[in-house]
Amino acid sequence: MVENPYLPIEAKVEKIIDETSNIKTFVLKSSKKIKFETGQFVQLTIPGSGEAPFTPSSSPSQTEKIELTVMNVGLLTGKLHEMREGEVVGIRGPYGRGYPLDDFYKKEVLILGGGVGMAPLRSLLLTLLENVDKFRRIVLCYGAKTPEDIVYKGAFPEWQKKKKLEILRSVDKAAPGWNETEGLVTVLLDKIEMDLKNSAAVVCGPPIMMKFGTLKLLDLGYQPENIYLSMEKNMSCGLGKCGHCGLGKYFVCKDGPVFKYDLIKDIPDIWL
Amino acid sequence: MKFLLNRANWENFLGQISKTYLIYAPQEFYGELAYQLLAPENVSKTIYNTYRAVQPLKTFFSLPQERVTEETTQAGKTIVLGVKNCDLKAISVMDKIFLEGEFVDPFYKERRDKTLIVSSDCYQPKDTCFCALLDNNPFPEAGFDLNLSQIDSVFLLEVGSPKGESFIAPIKEDLQDVTSDLIQKREKKRKEATERVLEVNREFRTERPFPSVVKDEYASPEWEEAARTCVECGACTNICPSCYCFLLVDTKDEGKFPKVKFWDSCQHTGFARVAAGVNPRAKLYERLRNRYLCKYEYRPENFGIVACTGCGRCVEACQGKIDKREVIKKLEERSGET
């Protein structure tokens, strides 16, 4: 029989990091190394419960362990949040097409993230930073609901020291001690100036933020082919076969999850 | 390669090999044609050249439910007889999904590899058949290992693949040269069948091809009207010979990560729903429309094949009496309405 793509490999939950009240990062050590490209996703199985797709939030260069940052929003993520260090999960993948780094070379890369959408973007950011000479400038605009809802709180001070990287953050609702921007993440885009002819924008976040973020980028003068979106769809098999993640003629699991906006802009209702 | 083969010789051969192969043959079953397991006793009851069986061919390769975290399918050597062209075309879509691309479905592949397809011309299309409206023919042209066209008491046997050729090697003494008269007779029957499909579908013929109508009339109010009687039972997708969608489900069975693949239906509410409950096709008519778009626009864009082959099974199976042909006809009639 040819190789069975439905079979997961074992991975041990080595460490669980609380990011916010409903987001945790799971550090997984798998029985075999999982080589992925930043932006690709894996299928995580909780034995006997189910399986769901997640894009690693760690850098692909860290091959010993992969990290998944997950918000508790449903049945499976709820179960995952109840797991303890030392327990075993299954992993299949990686699947799909990640961020086309070659497209970003010698360019200014604008990263627009919202909430737990920062997970794949952290993987991208770490990858860009590891090869920072190849890019002209990196700008991260990140928004969360409140300061408490910001993920990777401990990493930001370190990132802020990096050369070529600028970070702007906003929260929808400020709290005492917050001295950065208050407002939706899109307002950060008014505060920056990008060299539009030599820039790529990468967006990941909740559907509503993806929509208004993209519209704002178009407004600012970004061409659809320079906007890269991480599309969220219901991916069951991850192999381009089960049909659940159809987006027009595309299967998000196989042709995405990262799409250039110009490829999908004419498909009706893409933001739902 | 074409041969003349007496039906008696063929049946004798099938009887002999029915112990080594699982042979499924279309036979009468409560007024319909259904695949029955063949044994020497019922070998002569097979009806080759009327219309398609109730079950779509896909059921032999993609099971309604199957554990996919096994090492093997334990599938046996299989022969499916009397397959019609609508099913052959549909299987070409299934093949693209399950056998091509970066990942191959090992279970589908094993069954497919172990199965010999013996197709047959469709001489008596049903009233629900509409292959010719989609430029398909009621007779096989490709995708079969062997094709049988019964003419009087003999078969015109056509070989379609090396697999078919080696299969008939044991009966090569029974094979006779084919006469031009026999070929002409087959042509006549084929032409008559095509005309019959066009005749029964006279009222459903549209000015634009079906795929164009479905694509152009995306915003038509007819979609909502068409979905009015849909009860979301999923019969249309289950019975469809080219519907391939499935859901992977984790079970509490023995084993490391036991997963079962179940046929799924895009007509069900939660089919496309994502985390936290956002549903891109929350409305019933959106799901109904998506099925048409899948068949007539998306898969043709992927594979160059219209994924509806006009077998008419969904028309017969629909609890809400939704007739695809009627829906598309109305879409065209209501063109311009929003």
Image: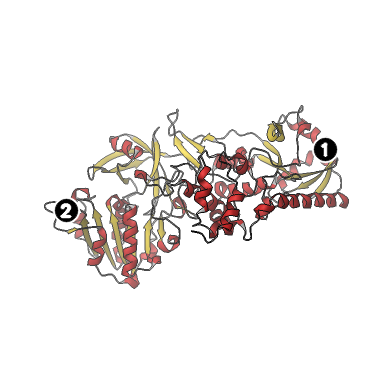
* Disc 2, SS: loop
Can residue A163 be seen from the camera position used here?
Answer: yes
Which of B293/A134 is in front?
B293
**Image quarter of residue A91:** top left
The chain that hosts pointer 2 is A
Mark 1 neighbour class, 10 Å CA radius: few under 14, some 14 to 19, many 20 or more:
some
Identified by mark 2, the residue type is Ala
Position of residue A219 measured from the top left corner of the image (x, y, whole percent): 32, 68
Task: Examine the rendering and report whether any part of residue B290 can be seen.
Answer: no
Comparing labels 1 and 2, the label whose residue is closer to the camera? 2
Binning the other alpha carbons within 10 Å of mark 2 as few (below 14), some (14 to 19) or many (20 upward) gives some
Q: Is residue A260 above or below residue B279?
A: below
Which residue, given by chain and number where applicable, does mark 1 sit on?
B7
Name the residue tied to disc 2: A174
Q: Chain of mark 1?
A: B
Extreme left residue here?
A176
Tell me the amino acid under the disc marked 1. Answer: Arg
* Percent of width and height locating residue A263: 45, 62
**Pointers 1 and 2 within a single chain:** no
Image coords of residue B69 (percent x, y) = 49, 35
